[in-house]
Image (cartoon, rainbow, N blue to C red):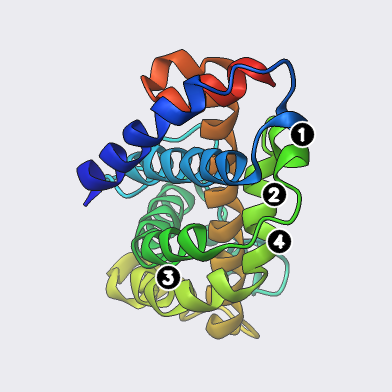
Amino acid sequence: MQNIERRKFLAAGAAVTMLALPGCASLPAFSLTDAIRRLLTLSSQNAFAQLIQPNGFFDSQVARLSVPEKLGGTRVTNIATAMLRSKPIQKRLLKQVNRAAEKGAELAAPVIADTIRGMSIADAAAIIKGSNRAATTLLQNQLGTSLATQMLPGVSKGLNLFDNEIINLVLSQVSDINFADISEDVTAKVSDAIYLAIGAEEAKIRANPQATNDPVLIGIFGLS
């Protein structure tokens, strides 16, 4: 499927190279819209290719999640506080949270792909001329909170905090912790991390479109 989509964009590149005009505003709207969709498609593909790998979030300088405050905060007993904040437990929790993020990202990838294919782009020229992550911001705004909603089941399943005997023992001493709230908190952070990763990839493409070997992106961003 990816190769098919790529061939479509390469074919469209011939039309773009014929539009060697001095400014983006003079280009036909459909060419700019194609460029934005291609930009987001490639940015998201590159981001998810990294994030869905084992330890993809944990190893990422952009998308790595921290342990939620509720798993090391103040609403615990003194003994549990010390144990939760100990390096071995925090390390285990950090790994678990970032593994859960991978499960959420697996559910997010097709949602984002479908959104890009069907998204409305009212002012394509403004996105092309915008900031390094203008297209990602547009995508994020169009999805709103729906991405987190789609990811929540995967993140919740991925946390599996009680599957680890040591963590289970520590958390059994914790009071007033709502694990549904923790899942929602982590999911919101996963959503933010995914957009950060996509935005970082968008910025790379804008800075060096030639590296994509995509005539559409090279043509459009060479004129912007």
Question: Are circles 1 and 4 on residues that touch, CB within 8 Å?
Answer: no
Q: Badge 3 local density, few (<14 within 10 Å), some, or many (20+)? A: many
The answer to whether residue 85 of the structure is visible from this angle is yes
Give the mark nearest the N terminus, 2 or 3. 2
- Measuring from the top left, give residue 180's x and y in whole percent: 55, 84
Question: Are circles 1 and 2 on residues that touch, CB within 8 Å?
Answer: yes
Residue 74 falls left or right of residue 120: right
Q: Which quarter of the figure has residue 169?
A: bottom left
For marks 1 and 2, give the CA distance: 10 Å
State the mark number for residue 141.
4
Looking at the rendered structure, the secondary structure element under dot 2 is helix
Residue at image coords 35%, 39%: 50
For marks 3 and 1, give the CA distance: 33 Å
Taking depth in this image into account, of 187 and 218 the one nearest to the observer is: 218
Label 1: which residue? Answer: 130
Of marks 1 and 4, the one in the foreground:
1
Q: Badge 2 local density, few (<14 within 10 Å), some, or many (20+)? A: some
The answer to whether residue 204 of the structure is visible from this angle is no
State the mark number for residue 137.
2
